């Protein structure tokens, strides 16, 4: 049964995170937007200590069962609040992001311990996940990065290029983190050949080659990574080594399992950002003497009142979809449909709300004096990474209509 009240344990954490958002994110939001590629170390260092005390902020929630599992629900609430603070700075939070989600979804218990233990240390550490390549984004079966087994040395040799890797610089250059590389062990096999591999920071042959200049979330680093005869230990292939000879779609299923966990969290990021824009819009309207008269029949409302109420409905309904998807994760229920559904909805909602807020406030919305214009730019990414809006719509349609991906593409 889904609870509509915030569980007590999570409410306490949200109070702390709200204070972080108010005091450590909002005051530096504009600075890090305008100084792209500078790193908000004060925030990072603080969060490293704070999240350890709160039991972690990782995309790989604890396996421990203490009463009902709340790991993903807690994470969604935290991410929503941090993104309310600043969606770009939130992406600099140490302690396990998309790379950890991949390890968690596809790794063996031994691998989870080996790769994720570092996040419990005092030093801020990062990870990243690398799927996208210059010639492959939405169609993940087209990846060309190869992994070839050197049996004599018991090593994998990786070759290829990954682009648009969130937090790749922090994972590989600024900390002793790791990246998860999706590569093919059989380029002719399409999805069946895909496997995830962990590459540790400092591994020879793995190089960060480019830092992107972006429209939004400019406090977060996005990089290209080149793998040139990059050798990694045999047991850095995630999952059981037997999958090496498995011709089924094990690897692709691992990618999808990762997305089931990460899409609702990306959706939570969108919701936090949308809520920030809507709240600021309402404050600005109040300052101008415009209050929203809730409870009146629709025909008696002004156009602005209708817009604001519609935005509130959109925001609430999208958040409820997120809560459903993370509740299913915590309760071990298959959630591919709900995960993509909430991602589609939240991606739409954050773009509509930020766009409308800028529109209603006119020059004030467009001016750099306020954060509305920045949030308008930050919003777009919610509809791009972790599967674009179109791709997640396809996933939803396939699940509802019972089509395979080959039948509806
Ligand atoms: C800031 C940023 C951070 C990112 N971080 C990461 C990361 O950490 N790791 C990572 O692996 N990737 C990351 N990405 C990449 C992102 O996931 C891809 O950009 C995304 O998956 C789309 O892939 P593409 O860019 O190749 O676009 P394409 O796949 O070429 O798509 C182009 C357009 O066509 C549409 N389209 C494609 N196929 C279909 C279809 N079958 N039906 C209808 N429409 C379709 C898409 O929706 C899109 O609008 C990031 C991207 C950005 C911008």
Image: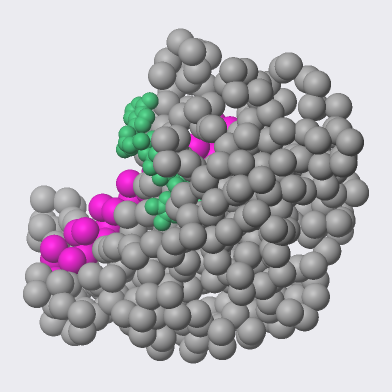
In depth, the one of 380 and 55 nearer the eye is 380
| Left/right of residue 390 with respect to residue 310 in the rendered view | right
Q: Residue at x 74, y 48 (%)?
A: 231
Closest to the observer, 7 or 69 = 69
Would you identify the image quadrant in which residue 213 lies? bottom left
Point 9% across, 74% down: residue: 363
Residue 262, magenta (yes or no): no
Q: Is residue 353 magenta?
A: yes
- Is the stretch drawn in magenta largely helix, strand or loop? helix
The residue sitting at 86% across, 56% down in the picture is: 114
Q: How many labels does the image show?
A: 0
Residue 261 rendering spot, x and y as whole percentages: 63, 45
Quarter assignment of residue 219: bottom left
Decide if residue 386 is in sight here. no
Relative to 249, 208 lies left or right: left
Determine the residue positioned at 61% across, 74% down.
174
Q: In the image, ligand 1 is in what quadrant?
A: top left
Asked if residue 54 lies left or right of residue 163, the reply is right
Say if 41 sits above or below 87 in the image. Answer: below
Quadrant where the C terminus sits is: top left
Residue 101, given in percent of the width and then of the height, sits at 67, 50
Q: Position of residue 112 (x, y in %)?
A: 82, 52
Residue 182 coordinates in the image, percent (x, y)? 62, 40
Is residue 22 or residue 48 the one in the foreground?
48
**Which stretch appears magenta?**
335-361
For residue 341, above or below residue 373: above
């Amino acid at each position: 049964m889904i609870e509509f009240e915030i569980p007590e344990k999570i409410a306490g954490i949200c109070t702390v995170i709200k204070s972080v958002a108010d005091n450590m994110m909002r005051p530096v939001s504009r600075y890090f937007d305008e100084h792209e590629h500078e790193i908000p170390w004060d925030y990072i260092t603080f969060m490293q200590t704070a999240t350890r005390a709160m039991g972690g902020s990782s995309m790989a929630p604890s396996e421990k069962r203490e009463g009902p599992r709340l790991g993903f629900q807690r994470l969604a609430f935290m991410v929503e609040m941090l993104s309310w603070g600043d969606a770009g700075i939130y992406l600099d939070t140490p302690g396990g992001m998309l790379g950890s989600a991949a390890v968690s979804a596809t790794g063996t218990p031994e691998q989870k311990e080996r790769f994720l233990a570092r996040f419990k240390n005092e030093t801020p550490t990062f990870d990243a996940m690398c799927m996208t390549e210059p010639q492959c984004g939405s169609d993940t079966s087209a990846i060309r990065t190869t992994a070839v087994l050197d049996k004599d040395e018991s090593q994998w040799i990786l070759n290829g290029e990954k682009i648009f890797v969130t937090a790749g610089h922090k994972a590989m250059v600024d900390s002793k983190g790791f990246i998860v590389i999706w590569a093919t062990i059989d380029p002719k096999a399409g999805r069946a050949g895909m496997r995830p591999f962990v590459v540790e920071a400092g591994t020879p042959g793995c190089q960060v080659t480019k830092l992107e200049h972006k429209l939004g979330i400019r406090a977060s680093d996005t990089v290209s990574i080149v793998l040139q005869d990059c050798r990694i230990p045999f047991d850095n292939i995630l999952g059981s080594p037997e999958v090496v000879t498995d011709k089924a779609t094990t690897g692709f299923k691992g990618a999808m399992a990762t997305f089931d966990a990460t899409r609702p969290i990306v959706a939570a990021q969108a919701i936090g950002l949308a809520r920030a824009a809507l709240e600021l819009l309402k404050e600005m309207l109040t300052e101008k003497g415009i209050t929203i008269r809730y409870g009146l029949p629709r025909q008696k409302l002004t156009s602005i009142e209708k817009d604001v109420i519609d935005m509130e409905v959109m925001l609430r309904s999208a958040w409820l979809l997120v809560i459903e998807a993370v509740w299913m994760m915590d309760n071990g229920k298959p959630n591919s449909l709900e995960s993509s559904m909430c991602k589609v909805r939240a991606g739409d909602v954050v773009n509509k709300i930020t766009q409308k807020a800028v529109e209603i406030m006119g020059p004030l919305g467009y001016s750099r004096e306020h954060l509305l214009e920045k949030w308008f730019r930050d919003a777009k990414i919610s509809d791009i990474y972790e599967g674009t809006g179109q791709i997640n719509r396809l996933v939803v349609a396939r699940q509802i209509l019972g089509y395979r991906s080959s039948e509806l593409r």
